[in-house]
Image (spheres, rainbow, N blue to C red):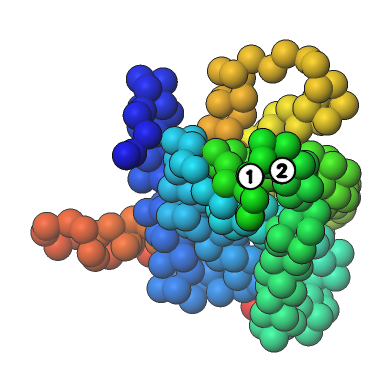
Amino acid sequence: MAPSISAFQAAYIGIEVLIALVSVPGNVLVIWAVKVNQALRDATFCFIVSLAVADVAVGALVIPLAILINIGPQTYFHTCLMVACPVLILTQSSILALLAIAVDRYLRVKIPLRYKTVVTPRRAAVAIAGCWVLSFVVGLTPMFGWNNLHAVERAWAANGSVGEPVIKCEFEKVISMEYMVYFNFFVWVLPPLLLMVLIYLEVFYLIRKQLNRKPSAPPGDPQRYYGKELKIAKSLALILFLFALSWLPLHIFNCITLFCPSCHKPTILIYIAIFLTHGNSAMNPIVYAFRIQKFRVTFLKIWNNHFRCQPAPAVDEDPPEERPDD
């Protein structure tokens, strides 16, 4: 018999479905834009595609699994563990993609003349593959033994039961808070976020330093290059800020759970923190559309070519102010 769903759970499911319906098409549109616009084929936008793939998976996989966990089915321990791990993999993939983007923007302003020889398509592909492999290693660590199986087995045996424990599937019941705080947060989330903040501060410093110099090349060339880099860096720093704003509340709740088990955590605040983490996957395409002109005009071109019922005037894929560097 299927478990009954309360009005609160129904509202939760409705919000999660809405997030998924925004996240999946929005990030598919990002991937589509990079595919159709040659001006979006440099390393930065390849890393953005990797980030968009993770965000599509959040909407298409993680949110349905989160809804399943919220309903609370009775499952075997390891089945529930497999349901809980994808969010860990995709979160780590997003963080590493953001770190790769930050390093890429730093190299563009630090070594602009040698950038294309250092950041080649092959190296970018290797970096993306490395990010995903590392994400799977970090996210699947609970499957290798760092989980709550022993505690669940003790409770299972105390009730006189035998065999693999059958539990109500909940994230905190199978995932160890020591893993979430000491390994996931303190090693793989917080340090990369702090490193990215330092990288972007250095990027803004280098750009401002160049913009304040008197042009030594043909008039306007350095100003145009670094002016464009400043706009893109601001947009990508906003993506980083939104990611931190979305994920830090839930990690703070995990710290409270570990270090102060008796502390009261309002249920509504926990749900808001969960909505923020899932909603972050829907934010990035909106930022790209409003902040990065190459994306905005490509989105409009895709809309005109594939979704309008009548012919529309062509849209310039690469406006003059943002044409690729020679």
**Res. 148 image quadrant:** top right
Q: In the rendered image, which quarter contains the N terminus?
A: top left
For disc 1, the marked residue is: 161
Q: Residue 157: which numbered mark, if any?
A: 2
Residue that appears at 57% across and 46% down: 166
Contact, CB < 8 Å: mark 2 with mark 1?
A: yes
Left or right of 3, for residue 267: right
Residue 138 seen in the figure: no
The residues bearing labels 2 and 1 have C-alpha atoms spaced at a distance of 5 Å
Q: In the rendered image, which quarter contains the C terminus?
A: bottom right
Q: Position of residue 14 (x, y in %)?
A: 36, 32
Left or right of 40, for residue 240: right
In the foreground, 230 or 41: 41
Residue that appears at 63% across and 54% down: 164
Q: Secondary structure at mark 1?
A: loop
Q: Position of residue 201 (x, y in %)?
A: 85, 45
Left or right of 63, for residue 270: right
Q: Secondary structure at mark 2?
A: helix
